[in-house]
Image (cartoon, coloured by chain):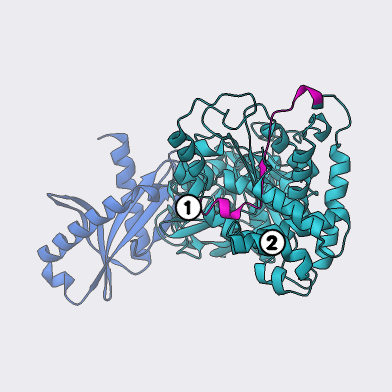
Amino acid sequence: MAAKDDLGRAGEDRAARHLVQRGFEILDRNWRAPGGELDLVAARGAELVVVEVKTRRGDGYGDPLEAVDARKRSRLWRLALQWLSAHPDEARGRTLRIDAIGITGRDPGTARLEHLEDVR
Amino acid sequence: MSVARTWAVALAGVEGTVVEVEADLSAQVPDFRIIGLPDKALGEAVQRVHNACANSGLSLPRRRLTVNLSPASLPKQGSAFDVAIAIAALATEASMDAASVATTAHIGELGLDGRLRPVAGVLPAVLAASRAGIERVVVPYANRDEAALVSGMRVHGAVTLAEVARLHGADIEPPDAEPVSTAEPDAPAAVVPELAEVIGQRDAVDALVVAAAGGHHLLMSGPPGAGKTMLARRLPGILPELDEDAALTAASIRSLCGATVTTLSRVPPFEAPHHSASVAALVGGGSRLVRPGAIARASEGVLFLDEAAEFPLGALDALRQPLETGTIAIHRAGFTATFPARFQLVLASNPCPCGDYGVRGGTCTCAPATIRRYVGRLSGPLLDRIDIELAMTRVSVAHAAPGGGVTTTAARERVRGARARAEHRLRGTPWRVNAAVAGPWLRQGPLAPSPVVRRPLDAALQRGSLTLRGYDRVLRVAWTIADLAGRDRLELDDVGRALFLKKGAPV
């Protein structure tokens, strides 16, 4: 596995821990569909959150959250709706939104984490 | 703080509108957008501001920045908003004094290196800010003299964006940077040629002084070599100096043309467009940024059309609205640019295409129909506005002795005296010069001429050789002649001389 994939994996672990600490339940990880992949799907009460995690070693190439552009967001929405139809029981009665988590630093375990809710 | 605001100025013609630049920072993925009808150059401010901030050591917030230019429905052009956008964007997060940012207008373009670049139209923009009650303005270093021409304004000429941020209390050490200078230095004040250089032509020089004293539009017609152009170029020298407002207007228009302005020139501008000039060249134009044409550039001064009969008819017709209203309005999708157009018109024309028609000793080779068509180009509504029609002849050897001419200084003194006299007489009326006075006031006003004085005019009117409009014009010129002579009432001589200037000398 390439180093960048390890980094991404470590970042997602960190994000998942962050969500659990805030009272979320992780419903799914790395859910794949023909149109792409969802990093994390989490729920808390009536909130159903699809989370895109971006990890960068440093900000030499800009903020990790800059990568969540309009094209990516529309793809996330498409995938999220696919996930909903594939998991009708977990989706029932919940409101969907998309969050982005950016992690900047050499070691994802301790790096700076930024959580943006409801990106649009 | 998540919302910051500051001021900039949008220009439409010489009229500026103060624009509030609001920047909002919201918790969204990083993005930078400008709304409020920006054009292409203004939309590209995003990239310039981004790089200028990065290269100045100032970091823009890494969230969604929305910059709104309000009033949002007014179309805005150009790069002069860059500094205001950058400062508003930085002030959403950086530690800057919000009150200081919110009471300052920022004008200038940013280079990618973070230096401020000079822009056109700083003077009208600062004037508009001043009228809107803004007391402090930041302009590029190269434009600081121009902005300082507006009295009562605190002007900061900034070299770099960091310097501007520091002005508002940001904790940053501005780098030592070479200011971006303007492309060319301020053009030295044009030297107006000396009136005494005109040899002979006593009548023509007198007519020129009358035109200057009353603000009368003038048509000079004569063969090539009679000195028409020579005389016209000497007119700005004998006109009174521009007052503060007029000088600011003239300088504002020069600034809009992209000229470097550092001083207020008191000499009335002189514009002499070539006779191949198009309507757009005279009126001004451009699809978004409207640039003033020759008519606007001649405002407060002299518009000289040499070879007037050679101008395209459309171009001559374009003069009619500004002559009527004193302004010129250019309409574009979404906005109207208005320029002042208070100029004195001087036309010069040959009597016929070959120039020898009616010249003693000359042989005209033009067909009669050609001559009629040539002269006919200038007829109609345009000639209706001309108070003085001067027929000039070539100077013969007998009159060509040098010396004895009227000097510019002496002529200007006479003009100033006459204008003061006219202004005193016209106090309490809306007019300041004789050329502007309405006909009924001349004929029936408190100083209407007595029947004896009026007799030659009445006779010409009854003969049909003078229209009622022409009647009024002769009265206006007659008053100017009386002013120059220092008389308080019209006399028969004044009217006779005015009739002569109107109808031309019998060749």
- Location of the N terminus of chain B (image quadrant): bottom right
Instruction: Point out the residue furthest to the top here.
Output: B397
Q: Secondary structure at mark 1?
A: loop
Residue B182: percent from left, percent from top: 66, 35
The residue lying toward the viewer, choosing from B411 and A63, is: B411
- Are discs 2 and 1 both within one chain? yes
Quarter the C terminus of chain B occupies:
top right
In x, y percent, where is residue B242? 77, 51
- Marks 2 and 1, the one that precedes in the sequence: 1
Q: Position of residue A31 (x, y in %)?
A: 18, 54
Residue pictured at 51% horizontal, 48% vertical = B379
For mark 2, does the 10 Å Cα neighbourhood hold few (<14), some (14 to 19), or many (20 or more) residues? many
Secondary structure under tag 2 reads: helix
Q: Give me the residue at 46% from left, 34% from top.
A: B368
Regarding residue B148, the answer to whether it shows in the image is no
Q: Nearer the viewer, mark 2 or mark 1?
A: 2
Work out whether residue B225 or residue A95 is closer to the camera in this orientation and state it: B225
Residue at mark 2 = B457
B374 lies above or below B148 = above
**Mark 1 lies on residue:** B62
- Work out whether residue B138 or residue B453 is closer to the camera in this orientation and state it: B453
User: Residue at (67%, 31%) from the top-left corner?
Assistant: B184
In the image, the segment drawn in magenta is: B380-398
Residue drawn at 65 percent across, 49 percent down: B503
**What residue type is disc 2 on?**
Leu
Q: Identify the chain drawn in cyan.
A: B
The image quadrant that residue A40 belongs to is bottom left
- Viewed as shown, does residue A47 lie left or right of B284? left
Do labels 2 and 1 touch, CB within 8 Å?
no
Residue B382 part of the magenta-drawn span? yes
B468 or A115: nearer the eye?
A: B468
Tell me what hue chain A is rendered in. Answer: blue
